Amino acid sequence: MVNFTVDEIRGMMDKKRNIRNMSVIAHVDHGKSTLTDSLVSKAGIIAGARAGETRFTDTRKDEQDRCITIKSTAISMFFELEEKDLVFITNPDQREKSEKGFLINLIDSPGHVDFSSEVTAALRVTDGALVVVDCVSGVCVQTETVLRQAIAERIKPILFMNKMDRALLELQLEAEELYQTFQRIVENVNVIIATYNDDGGPMGEVRVDPSKGSVGFGSGLHGWAFTLKQFSEMYADKFKIDLVKLMNRLWGENFFNPQTKKWSKQKDDDNKRSFCMYVLDPIYKVFDAIMKFKKEEIDDLLKKIGVTIKHEDSDKDGKALLKVVMRSWLPAGEALLQMIAIHLPSPVVAQKYRMEMLYEGPHDDEAAIGIKSCDPEAPLMMYVSKMVPTSDKGRFYAFGRVFSGKVVTGQKARIMGPNFTPGKKEDLYEKTIQRTILMMGRYVEAIEDVPSGNICGLVGVDQFLVKTGTITTFKNAHNMKVMKFSVSPVVRVAVEPKNPADLPKLVEGLKRLAKSDPMVQCINEESGEHIVAGAGELHLEICLKDLEEDHACIPIKKSDPVVSYRETVAEESDQLCLSKSPNKHNRLFMKAQPMPDGLPEDIDEGRVNPRDDFKTRARYLTEKYEYDVTEARKIWCFGPEGTGPNILVDCSKGVQYLNEIKDSVVAGFQWAAKEGVMAEENLRGVRFNIYDVTLHTDAIHRGGGQIIPTTRRCLYACLLTAQPRLMEPVYLCEIQCPEVAVGGIYGVLNRRRGHVFEESQVAGTPMFIVKAYLPVNESFGFTADLRSNTGGQAFPQCVFDHWQVLPGDPCEPQSKPYNVVQETRKRKGLKEGLPDLTQYLDKL
């Protein structure tokens, strides 16, 4: 049964140098959950024989049915390493002197792109990542996305090549081919790491290297794995070579000649690559003997590799015997555990360089220093990265990580939501933490207190946080940075209860749904519609199923999925637009113009930030986009929501009382940016310039009631005179398929306004990878359509990539944008036809 108790884990929590917080990340179906099982079974939580089939971390019923992970799940495990392995941990901050045990907090995360927000939440609370790559299909699009996210969060990766059993049994690769496959994957991963990591940065060496032991090989399904360290140990005594030297010799361009017993760097006729000879050959021999049923050879081999088979397994043969032998010869749990303990950082090491990425406040206040030194005596700083539903309907555990101080049952703490700004009261609650708990896959264990560097759950703070937030006892603490998601919610569905009397239950259910998923948005439209927005079809399907069965518990009617659009302009306004206030005493003169390409993306990704210092921001805008310096300094605000990709610039000269109406103009701009003129969709990539303002001298005649609606009318007039356009979201689709199916893909994409921009063959396999852009609007039912046209051989992955202008002019009837605008207006209950310019433009 379980090899440890909760008290033991609590004891380990204080030994922060022996803690490893790690997540498992990979492309969909590369075998994360299956691999996690071998670690879980090593800890004795599930029976060894069932590892690989249980998928212990897939806790929900739909996860087991669909064989995919949907939510990220956390498990804490306790292991001991042997003396000989501890020598490899050289950094003194990576282990306590006399302690052999390690506490590993593992988070298994989903691979589906629709759930990549779950991955982001998992990465925030961990310091290391086990990147799993299927050695048959290589590095895929999602591997790259999650790896990029990990490096942006300063998380150290180690690599594991999974599914070696397929490479040997299905593809029947030669040893040299297999080596080249591994070599290529390691190179691909290192290229991604080098691209996104700053060299000479605080993390030190991040690239993975088999000869250092930070790359593992094996099969999660069969439960065996190794790093070069395991094989070096077998040979070190025989060769009388130092272990570390041997590990370097077993990878790369090293060849050994068995006749002359000489090593060389070149390939000759009579020598052989050391990795093939000493690592792959023994494995090949075992596979060959067992799969071809050579009884005598099997017994000899087992003696050589030192494996004894239990009596009850002795009559097995074929794959069943193969599993038993490989499992006892190269147990996966052992190899993974050593990789994690030796190569992943402890909280003490990691928080030194992660603090500046995590904390928004000054880098020398108490909280920052507490995080940096991972000090349990400092003030409490804890980040809640997601909410986990409990068995008790409607209540959630707040799941997160303690970065400094300790969190104690019953202590009073400040709970700060993402909109909190220091010194203000909004989004701040002072409340008691009812209980602290330890998360164990499907179970939770109560625990008294949790010190810094650990992951835990809290009971009783879920009413005060929507999804994420910071919990602290330090009066002047700032927030931890908000997580950046790599996907955005672009597909929306309207929901309503089948029985109108159930409406309050639906509203309550939507609130809970918004808590339970880091990405989903629940919006109440002014027309009374309830909108659920998600990242893609699959994500929405799961969310609506949860809403119906768990959160609202009522039957629901749902509309067809709709895509959200953005409004933009194509040119500068063709006239200076004037609007007068209702009392005719104030006038605004403005123009709209499109932003240069790339600026909206820069704002989205935070390179141009409303919180930046205005001088540095102005310098960036003048250098990169050739904006005028004085204008770039006078950006009044960004919108919508104060952070969106539209700006309001003051280009006026010497206007009296201008700053007194600034707040009102900004409010009008936020309103117009949130609801554009054509279909009340958000604006994107528009710059508004204020050229002149004439104001009444008396303050009472230029209040908000006069200025706000005037600003909005003026902005609408600017948009209508600047050739308005619609933008639609576009997916980047990566499709894997054999060569014969490529033709079918082109057919499907052409029917759906998609286009292919890259096509490449995966080296060493018959598979092709086709990359294409596909408008989200056309993506519904795309997977089914694709499979029926390629005979089920193509597998697509779609990620939201960018916005593009919908071709055509929305003002001309019969054009596509015109129809989209009409449909949207009808759905929102606005009057038909585009609004007329004369409603907004005034004459002098």
Image: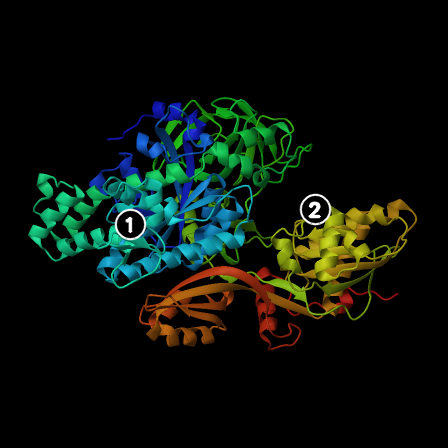
Choose top left, top right, bottom left or bottom right for residue 476: top right
- Whether residue 525 is visible, yes or no, is yes
795 sits left or right of 602 in the view: left
Where is residue 501? Give x, y as percent. 47, 47
Tag shown at residue 55: none
Identity of the residue drawn at 30% across and 59% down: 178
Q: Residue furthest front?
A: 260
Q: Label 2 amino acid? A: Asp
Choose top left, top right, bottom left or bottom right for residue 550: top left
Label 2: how many residues lie within 10 Å, few (<14), some (14-19) or many (20+)?
Answer: few
The residue to which callout 1 is attached is: 218
Report the quarter where the C terminus lies. bottom right
Where is residue 676? Give x, y as percent. 67, 60
- Whether residue 488 is visible, yes or no, is no
Q: Is residue 419 above or below residue 762?
A: above
697 sits left or right of 297 in the view: right
The residue to which callout 2 is attached is: 612
Helix, strand or loop status at disc 1? strand
Helix, strand or loop status at disc 2? loop
Report the quarter where the N terminus lies. top left
Identity of the residue drawn at 13% across and 54% down: 289
